Image (tube, rainbow, N blue to C red):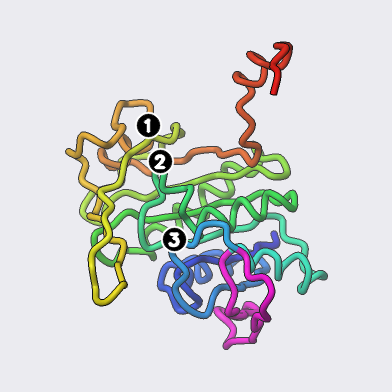
Amino acid sequence: MKIFLSNDDGIDSNGLISLAKQLSKDNDMLIVAPDGNRSVCSHSLTVKKPITISPCDKLFGQPTYKTSGTPADCVKILEHHFTDFKPDVVVSGINKAHNLGSDIFYSGTVAIAYEAAYYGYIAFAFSAYSLGESPFDEYSPYAEKIINALLPYSEPSTIWNVNFPDVDVNIKDIKITKLGNRTYDDKYVFVCDDNYQLTSTDIKFDDKSLQIEEDYDLYWIKNGYITVTPLVFDRTDYAKLEEIIDKCIKF
């Protein structure tokens, strides 16, 4: 199988290196990742200025490149620069933080999967909830099993969002589940002059802002499960569309 691997934490991230080590054993890979951390940059692209695409030392024998661009740029590079490499699957991660519930709107890790879906690729976004450094070498074999198990149920542009539980929680099993929702404890902190910095506290599972009913990813992560959620590229509100499409609304 051919796999394209990327992330938003950067080419030197332990999460990416662990996945490369695991997935390179039985697959052909191309690895392109940002040259530094690009966390929380969502689906941004680099336009109106050049980006670098530089070869690195091969990771486990696989061709490896770093770029000054964004995570989503990495997929653009695959599609428009490395035109001879057509992957069977695009893999992102393993991210050094969870991407649960509403986190997906801000995640560079998930943006890679969405950009891949735009081009018709099957995509997996892997993230690890941890208050410290996650045991990526323990998570990566699970990642490979999840990819192999879900590929038969994947069509072009299918996106799978996968999260691993806290490092201090023993993995019980894997759950297919819905995205939850949470509000963020965000605030801008004064730095100096006219400078402010956005800050937020770490996730707390007793926080009332969390949607932790049994149907949602936040609940299962809290209880020691790997969560898997299928996502869609189309954000059309079909219920609202059906409600108003035949109305004679005047604008």
Q: CA distance from mark 3 to mark 1?
A: 22 Å
Q: Which residues are magenta?
A: 45-71
* Coordinates of residue 21 in the picture (x, y in percent): 50, 71
> Residue at (38%, 34%) from the top-left corner?
180
Mark 2 surroundings: few (<14), some (14-19) or many (≥20) residues within 10 A? many
Q: Earlier in the sequence, mark 2 or mark 1?
A: 2
Question: Which structural element holds mark 3?
Answer: loop
- Tell which residue pokes out farthest to the right in this image: 84
Give amino acid for label 2: Gly
> Residue at (38%, 26%) from the top-left corner?
215
Q: Which label number is shown at residue 40?
A: 3
Q: Quadrant of residue 192?
A: bottom left
Q: Earlier in the sequence, mark 3 or mark 1?
A: 3
Q: Nearer the viewer, mark 3 or mark 1?
A: 3
Q: CA distance from mark 2 to mark 1?
A: 8 Å
> Residue at (48%, 74%) from the top-left corner?
10
Please name the residue that numbered disc 2 is placed on.
Answer: 101
Give amino acid for label 1: Tyr
Q: Is residue 49 magenta?
A: yes
Q: Nearer the viewer, mark 2 or mark 3?
A: 3
Q: Is residue 246 magenta?
A: no
Q: Which label number is shown at residue 216?
A: 1
Height in image: 23 above or below 50? above
Q: Mark 2 touching mark 3, by CB under 8 A?
A: no
* Coordinates of residue 102 in the picture (x, y in percent): 42, 42
Mark 3 surroundings: few (<14), some (14-19) or many (≥20) residues within 10 A? some
Q: Mark 2 touching mark 1, by CB under 8 A?
A: yes
